[in-house]
Amino acid sequence: MRPSLPYRVDQAGRFVSYELGELSMDSRRRRSTMGQNNLDSASLFYHVSSGGRRYQLNLTRNAAFFAPDLLVEYWGANGPERRRRRRGTSAGTCHYTGHVSGKASTSQVAPEQLRWFDLPWSRAQVSGGVGEHTVTERTGGRTRRSVSRERTVETLVVADKLTVAFHGRGSVEDYLLTIMNIVARLFHDSSLGNLVHVVVTRLILLTEEQPELRLSHHADKSLESFCRWQHQAATHHRNEELRSSGLPRHDNAVLVTRHDICSYKNKPCGTLGLAPVGGMCEPERSCSINEDLGLASAFTIAHEMGHNFGMNHDGMGNKCGGEGEEPARIMAAQLTAAASPFSWSSCSRQYISRFLDSGRGDCLNDSPQTLNLVMPTELPGLRRSPDVQCRLQHGPTSRQCKFRDVCRQLWCVSRSKLCVTNSIPAAEGTACASDNGDVGWCFRGRCLPLGNRPVPVDGLWGSWGAWSKCTRTCGGGVSSSERKCDNPKPTHGGTYCLGVRGRYRSCNTEDCPAGTQDFRDKQCASFNSQPFRGKLYSWTAYTAVQGKMCSLVCLADGYNFYTERAEVVVDGTRCHDDPDSFNICVNGECKHVGCDRQLGSTLTEDKCRVCGGDGTTCETIHGEFSKSIPWGDYHKVVHIPRGAVNIEVEETVPSKNYLALRTKNGFVLNGDWTVQWPHSLTLAGTRFLYKRPVGEVEKLSARGPIDQPITVTVLLQERNKGIRYSFNVPLKEDHQASFAWFLEPWTPCSASCGKGERKRVATCRRLLHLTVALSEQCQAEKRPPNKRQVCSAQPCPAVWRPREWSKCSRSCGGGNRSRTVVCIRAPSGATAVILDNSLCHGPPPPSKEACNAQDCPPQWVALAWSRCDSMCGPGLMHRPVLCKSADLTQTLDPSKCLTTSRPTVQRHCTRKRCPHSRWLVGHWGECSAQCGLGQQVRRVWCAASDQQPSMLCPAVLRPRNAQACQGACETSPRSLSEECRDINKVAYCPLVLKFRFCSRAYFRQICCKSCQGQ
């Protein structure tokens, strides 16, 4: 069914003209020979027929389509020529909203929901011509204001000279903003797995070539030039000017060009865009160039911005886009009819999630302070017909040439008069022919019935999953737990869940056994069997690459090169090879680990290297070696005892002298007149860092503790200019003499009115600095008692005091609760006195309020019990338990209901009495002891009257199956010549006597004397 042609009427519905008028896209009003038929009016009225009924559309210009503070700049050859803030009130704005007057008795679409969207605006259109227009359903509420602070890409959009000339100054602004609106919608799609807002904060339109910007068919050179240029444009000569002029900053820059770009060539080809992979938030790499393809340029821009977020092409090193795999989507390497450009693949979702979780997108965590973006709900195809979309791609003479499957591919007449396609669908909202032949509109690549637009469903988090297996068996691994945005899953443009999707905890934090292979080395060694550039290598970890703490960089053993073998290391890998740091990599980001080896812990070591300590268990030794001594020999600076920590030794000023280290076995650093290069060395159970920067002081440092004493010496090659040293040593046990109890000053009165109390509390302090110490540092017997004192203040005034709220009348769905409010005078520490309400000033607190207004969650509904499943005696009954919606109208998936509150699905039951059963016993077995106390057992079982095994015997009547027994001991008289004595001489036999083991032959023999008479 084809919609009727509308005609213009006045407010009363009287015919005016079939000429719908022409919209000026310039900010200035255009003169027109149409007189009152032009669209300068703030209100317009039309008659249109649909579904056999006629309606009057009352339209009002919508001035809230654009960001109120969007900065639009026109740049000539010498830079900015004109700047203005675009506030969405341009006279050329062709976006109208409205309502329908009158009602019809029958209509597929409710008449008050009809909206007129598409009016002729292109200057190429013949004035007075009548084109086709679309009547469609209003699918949603008012335009919503988005002020999200989750991930906001503040975007600079630049159109080159060719683009501005092609579209014209009067149209290019709206054209580019429409494209970026499509881009924003694509990044709002829930398949991205993250909530990302794309906001245009600055629009630069180039009317002339720029001296520092070199654009051509060569995509790579053009990208390099643009990325450098946009970084300069971000500050425009000086950072001071950016701040003082109020120019908005940007996180990402997008160039739209009419050059037919080609990668690695300076001639046209099929390349549509180019961007640095993973460049987001890097000032000179967060950029892209995109060939202007009309409204379909939005898919190219979204694709290239995806590269900035670290996404690879679907099918490139991932399991998307290949045969038998998930189809390629926005990140498809090539645009074909098979690709789905309206959503993101799971591979793209993993790439961007990993990128953001690693912290590389932290510049997106803020949002524009002065920008309240109004997100339009209208689909772009409603404002631009297929012919208009073709003209945006191929020029003013182009038009649509194939009409089937326009929602999948838009076919247009090219400049060479051929019917061609870029394999890109028409914009959403474009008119199409549905399967039954009726007029429909394009939505996400499909032709749906006109006005049919699925209602967005926002996502909610599901329950947390189980903790994963620890990533390491020792040395500090990571266990993780995740939850998915599937309760419900966001659909039809609904927003993705906000909040934490993964949580982590430390596990297996104990040190690995001595000799265990380094965890990074182990990961590198796993690549030994994988050819690299056609050859096998042995790999070891290489950690000297800046900014690659959580990437697996490996050194080819025996060769002078290293390479990144994996983008991220296994979770739980140490960020660096510093043994004094416990920080580990999680999801490719270095995470803080406290000294207790727990992820995210804030515990730190004190100066004594005690985790969570207060620095009171050691003392600092410091000094300066500044003696005037002869040159040309080694001289002792300081002796550092065993157990010292936080050792620091350095020259006071640069010199030609050299620090050296010596143990009882001789020199270990710079000894025997041999000076070593700066390095780290393991000595005395810790690692020493030796630094000697050119032109700076020489330094030695170690965290400690050292397990043997060391001596710091200096090799003097010129006069001694001074050497400072400091280290901390444990306090001796008599250190309590350095602490004492002090009574603190009186505290303020505990009551601001009436009777109160103040007190003085004893505190343990260090005598040296009078700083507070732990109570254990002072002698408990010398602690003075705390002092208390009554204090008085002004009489307490009468005040309202509410009692506790009653229980809410409903747990959800809106209830009420109440409480008692009384007027009292309540002196501190005394019983409150209830007064007459007239003595309290001001209105009393509310005594009633609404409560639990949230919607009721799904609930379990238990159906009737089944019959008992046993023929006799005990059995089980079962019943179905369903998860139902709050109004009990829908049966839901059981995961939607709370597991812990699920009713039982079975219970015990008893049928008629079963045949008589009784316990039977066997014969007692032999005694376990040959002499003295032992144990013997027998078989006990339950049998029915037919001697078959039964489970119906009462447990309380079960006979015992074990008893004590006495083994017969040897009774032959001992020889008189054989002495009865205790063989054991180490106080063993009294224990035998105490525990009554004399009845056992072995103990009676070795403790004969002790066991006599027993």
Image (cartoon, rainbow, N blue to C red):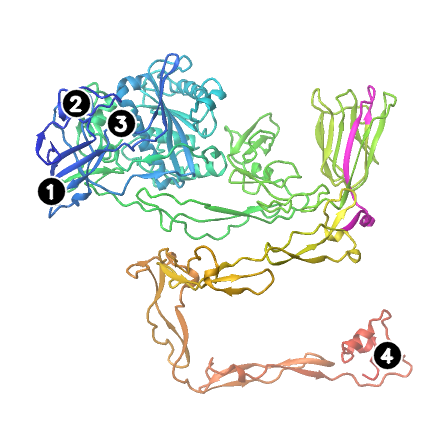
Residue type at tag 2: Gln
Lower sequence index among marks 1 and 3: 1
Where residue 392 appears, as percent x and y from the top left, is 24, 24
User: Please, is residue 277 above or below residue 582 in the view?
Assistant: above
SS of the residue under disc 2:
loop
For the residue marked with disc 3, what is the amino acid? Asn
- Please determine whether, in this image, residue 974 is positioned above or below residue 369: below
Q: Nearer the viewer, residue 725 or 783?
A: 783
Residue in the picture at 88% in, 83% down? 975
Give the crowd class for mark 1: few <14, some 14-19, many >=20 residues within 10 Å. some
Q: Which residues are magenta?
A: 714-741
Residue 483 seen from this side: yes
User: Is residue 120 depicted above or below 190 in this figure?
Assistant: above
Query: Does the residue at mark 4 contact the one at mark 2 (Cβ under 8 Å)?
Result: no
Q: Which residue sits at x=32%, y=36%?
A: 375
First in residue order: circle 2 vs circle 3: 2
Mark 4 vs 1, N-terminal side: 1
**Marks 4 and 2, the one that precedes in the sequence:** 2
Mark identifier at residue 125? 2
Label 2 and label 3: CA atoms lie apart by: 24 Å
Q: Quadrant of residue 115?
A: top left
Q: Which residue is mark 1?
A: 51
Please report whichever mark, 4 or 3, sits nearer to the chain's N-terminal start. Answer: 3
Measure the alpha-carbon separation of dots 1 and 3: 35 Å
